[in-house]
Image (spheres, rainbow, N blue to C red):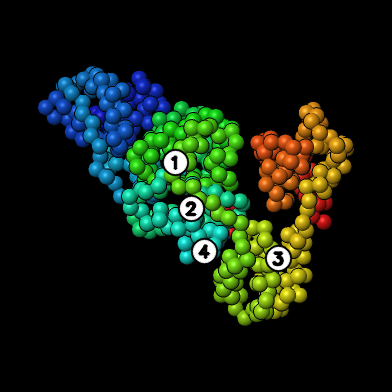
């Protein structure tokens, strides 16, 4: 049988099976040979082979017969392994116009997020607060047999979760370029999933996620409360664990503390190794600053850095590493612009706002007072039991600010809000986080309140 004739049969299949089925299942097939009544096809993956042979074999056979080919049996085989799957792999080599479009399923480009080239193990400074997380990440990055699954990294914002995940991906890719490593945020996972649903390509979606060797999902707390995405995530997760494929997950809190996450998912997440990144301590902050300063010395040659400046910053900026880095970046840029040595004075001038913000210790009581004033409600209602929206919402805003601007724990915050349970506080915070994304008025209110409180 000629390629042209297979091309015509394909057109017939397109008509009977519909475009979606066709592009997902038929297009990726290559006709290997037709001989002695046996049509032999190659499919890109085992999964596709099984699916096609179960669902479409008979129709393919009938269409071949209609086109005048004697076919008793249709066989499907898995094509030989292909080179580096991370790069986009072109369609199979065929010489004719009937060349199929690029394959789908696991041969397609992995829809991961790009990796930040700066986030490597080399640039990650290890200290007491993150040494366990770092060691676990290193272990995973070595590859080899999976010893704990998943690796679950959690910790507050800016403590290096994303950095570590990228470092793992870089390292794995360097060691074994053929490994299919997929890194993406939980938000992207959801986006892909919804898109696949919309375009009726859910089989392709499943196949793609089940075909990776290492799956890394960042900020998994994002899918809390998103039921169908959770469901899909759960299945993907299980399928990969069953195949003994490494999974790395990050979140801003421990699995058990993520509200609106199904219990079965929580318990699955807890099955592996759960490690937290603790808030930075002085030594770690200084270490990070020294490393960064070293980097900037190369970038701004001739710029002088006075003794004690880094120590001063490590001491004063305790919020998170991102803020710390931002401060140093600004400092070097400013100093090079004005052509001055970086001294304590210069740092204090140039970073006044950052220093002030991390300097002020805001109390929960102040937050409650400012928020009640802003929304015109009574302070007593802030901690009282009323549940009407006009009171409940400001209360939730106050809870949110209490969590983000103080170091108080959820149970402590609960106690200051009239002895509420920590789960109530968590719920309030989540609610505000969600609303903030869509309600610009609320987002503005919060910014304003934060500035008032920091002033
Ligand atoms: P998270 O994902 O936990 O919110 P990131 O991984 O995005 O935090 O880290 C925020 C910034 O701080 C990044 O620029 C990262 O490189 C830097 N950072 C965090 N921890 C360290 C560390 N231990 N050493 C070097 N840089 C760090
Ligand atoms: Mg992150």
Q: Which residue is mark 2?
A: 165
Where is residue 62? Give x, y as percent. 24, 19
Which SS class for mark 3? helix
CB of mark 4 near ligand 1 (< 8 Å):
yes
**Foreground: disc 2 or disc 1:** 1
Query: In this view of the protein, can residue 366 be seen by the observer?
Result: yes
Q: Which mark is residue 281?
A: none
Residue at 49% x, 55% y is 133
Which SS class for mark 1? loop
- The quarter holding residue 314 reads bottom right
Q: Which residue is mark 1?
A: 271
Q: Quadrant of the N terminus?
A: top left
Residue 107 drawn above or below residue 391:
below
Residue at 78% x, 51% y is 363
Which SS class for mark 2? helix
Q: Which residue is mark 3?
A: 316
Circles 2 and 3 in contact, beta carbons < 8 Å: no
**Foreground: disc 2 or disc 4:** 4
**Foreground: disc 2 or disc 3:** 3
Real-space CA distance between mark 4 and mark 1, rounded to the nearest whole angstrom: 26 Å
Q: Which mark is residue 126?
A: 4
Real-space CA distance between mark 2 and mark 4, rounded to the nearest whole angstrom: 15 Å
């Amino acid at each position: 049988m000629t390629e042209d004739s297979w091309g015509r049969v394909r057109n017939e299949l397109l008509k009977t099976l519909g475009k979606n089925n066709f592009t997902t299942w038929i297009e990726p097939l290559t006709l290997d040979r037709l001989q002695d009544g046996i049509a032999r096809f190659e499919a890109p993956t085992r999964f596709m082979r099984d699916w096609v042979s179960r669902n479409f074999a008979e129709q393919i056979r009938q269409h071949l017969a209609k086109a005048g080919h004697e076919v008793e049996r249709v066989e499907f085989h898995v094509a030989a392994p292909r080179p580096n799957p991370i790069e986009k792999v072109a369609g199979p080599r065929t010489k004719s116009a009937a060349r199929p479009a690029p394959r789908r399923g696991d041969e397609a480009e992995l829809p991961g997020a790009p990796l930040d080239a700066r986030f490597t193990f080399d640039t990650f400074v290890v200290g007491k607060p993150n040494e366990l997380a770092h060691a676990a990440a290193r272990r995973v990055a070595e590859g080899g047999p999976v010893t704990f699954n998943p690796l679950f990294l959690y910790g507050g914002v800016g403590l290096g979760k994303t950095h570590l995940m990228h470092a793992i991906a870089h390292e794995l890719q360097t060691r074994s370029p053929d490994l299919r490593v997929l890194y993406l945020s939980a938000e992207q996972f959801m986006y892909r999933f919804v898109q696949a649903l919309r375009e009726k390509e859910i089989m392709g979606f499943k196949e793609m996620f089940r075909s990776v060797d290492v799956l890394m999902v960042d900020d998994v707390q994002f899918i809390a409360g998103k039921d169908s995405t959770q469901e899909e995530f759960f299945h993907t997760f299980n399928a990969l664990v069953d195949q003994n494929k490494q999974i790395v997950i990050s979140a801003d809190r421990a699995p058990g503390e993520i509200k609106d996450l199904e219990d079965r998912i929580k318990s699955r997440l807890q099955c592996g190794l759960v490690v937290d990144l603790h808030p930075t301590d002085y030594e770690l902050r200084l270490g990070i600053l020294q490393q960064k300063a070293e980097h900037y010395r190369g970038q701004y040659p001739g710029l002088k850095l006075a003794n004690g400046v880094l120590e001063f910053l490590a001491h004063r900026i305790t919020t998170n590493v991102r803020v710390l880095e931002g401060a140093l970046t600004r400092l070097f840029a400013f100093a090079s612009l004005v052509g001055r040595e970086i001294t304590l004075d210069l740092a204090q001038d140039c970073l006044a706002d950052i220093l002030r913000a991390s300097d002020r210790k805001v109390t929960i009581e102040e937050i409650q007072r400012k928020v009640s004033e802003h929304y015109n409600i009574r302070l007593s209602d802030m901690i009282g039991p009323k549940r009407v929206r006009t009171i409940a919402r400001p209360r939730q805003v106050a809870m949110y600010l209490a969590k983000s601007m103080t170091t108080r724990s959820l149970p402590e915050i609960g106690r200051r809000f009239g002895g509420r349970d920590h789960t109530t506080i968590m719920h309030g915070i989540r609610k505000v986080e969600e609303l903030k994304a869509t309600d610009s008025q609320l987002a503005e209110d919060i910014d304003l309140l934060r500035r008032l409180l920091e002033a």
